[in-house]
Structure formats: C-alpha cells, structure tokens
Amino acid sequence: MVLSESETLAMARRSRELKALGKDIISLSIGEPDYDTPQFVKDAAKLAIDENFTHYTPVAGFAELRQAVSTKFKRDNGLNYTPEQIVVSTGAKQSIANAILSLVDPGDEVLLPAPYWVSYIEMIRLAGGIPVVIYSGIEHDFKITPEQLAPHITPKTRMMIFSSPCNPTGSVYSHDELKAMAQFFQHYPDIYIISDEIYEHIRFEGKHTSIASFPEIYDRTITVNGLSKSFAMTGWRLGYIGAPKWIADACDKFQGQITSGTCSVTQRAAIAALEADPEVIGEMVKGFHHRRDLMYGLLKEIKDLQVNLPEGAFYFFPNVSAFLGKMGAGQLIQTPQELTMYLLNEFQLATVGGEAFGCNDSIRLSYAVSEVQIIESVKRLKAGLESLV
C-alpha cells in the first residue's frame, strides 16, 4: 500500500520553506502549543541526566512512570488501570498505532467518525483494515450519535476510533452523549473503542468524561493520552494507553519489535508532569480560552463563513463551502485544499484543507499562536475569501 503524507505536517513544511525564502507567513497549520514546557518538568529531566537515566528502559515504561499514569487515570478520570495495563510509547501517535495494529486484521472494518485526526485513516489502512467514515457536520457540532452509527455496523466491524476534545474541530462529547454511546456499544461485544483524549485538559466548559468510565464497555476500551498538548511537551514524545491487560500485553510485544521503550529522560520528566496537579497548566488553558473567544468573534464577522464555538483543543473548523467554485488569481477554487494553497500563496496564510480530516467543505485553523497573529491571520483570511469572485 501507499501511505499518504500527513497534510498537517506537509503544510507546516511548506510554510517553513516559504519562510526560508523570506515570505511573511503566518501558520495556523500545526497542532502545537506555543507555550514552553513547565520549568519543573525540565528540571526533572536535567536531574535524570545527572542521575544517569541514560540506558535502555523497559519496553512499556519505567515502573514508576506506569504507576504515575495509573494514579493519574484514577485521579482525573475515575479509571482503574493497574500499572500492568499501561503502556508508554513515543507519543500518543505510536500508542494509537500500536493498538490498531494489535487489534485490526486485514478486512476488518473500523468506524471512523468524521471529521477525524489525519493519521487515523492511514493507520487503519496500514493494518489492512477498512475505514468506514461517518460524517457529522457543523450544524451538529461535528458529533455523531448512536443512531448514525447503527446502519454501519456489520459482522466485520472491529473497532471505532474517536477523539474528545476533537482534533480538528475542538468538539467535546458530553457525559450524557458518551453514556449513550457506551449503552449502544454494550450490544456489540466484539467491537473495541479507541478513545483519544490527548486534549483532555484543554477544554473550556464542564468536566472531562472518559468513555471507559462506563462499566459496560470498560473492558473493550483503549484510553489514549499523553503530554504533548497539556504540558506543551510535543518534542519530548511521550504518550500512553490504559487498556485491558491482554491488549496492553499485545501493544507491549508489538512495540518491543518496533521501537522498544521511549526516551529514558523523557520518562523521568513525565513522572513529574503526571504527579503534578493539573492546575499547574491553568494559565495556559486560560490563554487558549481567551484566544478562542478572540478568534471566534473575528471569524463571525466574515460574511458567508460558517463557524461554531468549540469547547476544547485549540482549533476552529469553519465551513467554507460558500467560497468554493469561485475564481481567485486566475484559478478556479473547487476544494478546501485548493483554497488553502490559494491562501498560502496569495495571502501568506497557512491553514489545512478539510479533506485530510475526512471533510470536503471545511478548513482547519489552529489558534495556538499569539493574539497579534490571530488578529492578523483572520484579517488575511477575510481578505483572501473576499477576493474570490
């Protein structure tokens, strides 16, 4: 099979190339906090180096780290995962890939609510699975219901993958919405669920709910999380799962043949982050909340742009269908991808086309940038859209 390049990483690469040529590019394309890793986490890493934590680690992670993850799951999510049910990986991306490749066989069908994170569909295909895309639009805050899932269940259905808070939409499933989902899957005991909760702490209304907290599907849920977003540790590369022990064992075995354990120093730093009160990142979350409100107000001023108010993460996913089929700079703009290239080349604004997320009428905007850049980027977006005729 042929794997596609991640469109978010591709756009980030194009942006860097244009910046290197002296272009004044504002990039809203990458999902990375623009905050620095907290100092106490960096101090823990420095101490780890001084204490010579520089050797191979257990594949699934240091015992102290797996205990810290177990304690975090109980503290923050009400989930009882023993350390033996934890596998630490080189980023949540690897955690998800491990689970998919351990559970999905060629020909298995995987339910994929859309919009979805770009890498899910390629991971499914890599395992030989068949993605079954189920789309929900902006009018429903991009969230699916059990009623939408039901027609897509077949004897070949093996898994569902979703994220909440969601990348690319920022949508968050409520407790009651997840309860309804859990009750639905209770009737399908052969279907597993991967719940990607990497943006857990970046939400602006209510309390986070993990779908594994509903006992009827706890034994069939793989809960994925990590530190890249909540602790601004993207470059450190650490993610983890909590799962039924037999699934954790399978992921441990798979990882042992591919990468072994993740960086020893990162693991020691992660213990400090996981043991900390989540309130230590409160100022960062407040900052994202303020930026969300700022960008929302500005986007609402653009005529014919459909936008909703996301409850988490740091993205908007506006519907741009009113601008497709128009001309700009002598070319016909027919798709979100073509629109993003037009905005990049003509207005020096980097965004990501919705096709990469399973959506043909939207683009993704990240507001993990400064307020000054938010104001300027929306100004460029408005000018670019209004230039189309």
Image: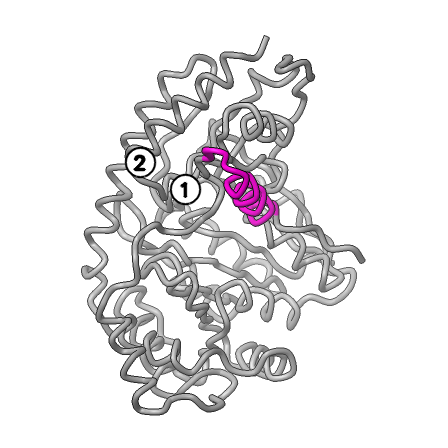
Q: Is residue 124 visible?
A: yes
Left or right: 134 in relation to 83: right
Density class for disc 2 (Cα within 10 Å; few <14, some 14-19, many ≥20) is many
Name the side, left or right, on which 336 lies relative to 127.
left
Q: Residue at x 38, y 80 (%)?
A: 265
Q: Which label's residue is closer to the chain start, 2 or 1?
A: 1
> Which quarter shows the C terminus?
top right
Q: Which residue is mark 1?
A: 170
Which sits in the foreground, 356 or 148?
356
- Furthest-top residue in view? 389
Q: Position of residue 94 (x, y in %)?
A: 55, 67
Colour option used:
one colour
Question: What amino acid type should be assigned to the residue bearing mark 1?
Answer: Gly
The residue at 62%/15% (across/down) is 328
Tell me if label 2 and label 1 are in contact, CB under 8 Å. yes
Q: Secondary structure at mark 1?
A: loop
Is the magenta region chiefly helix, strand or loop? helix
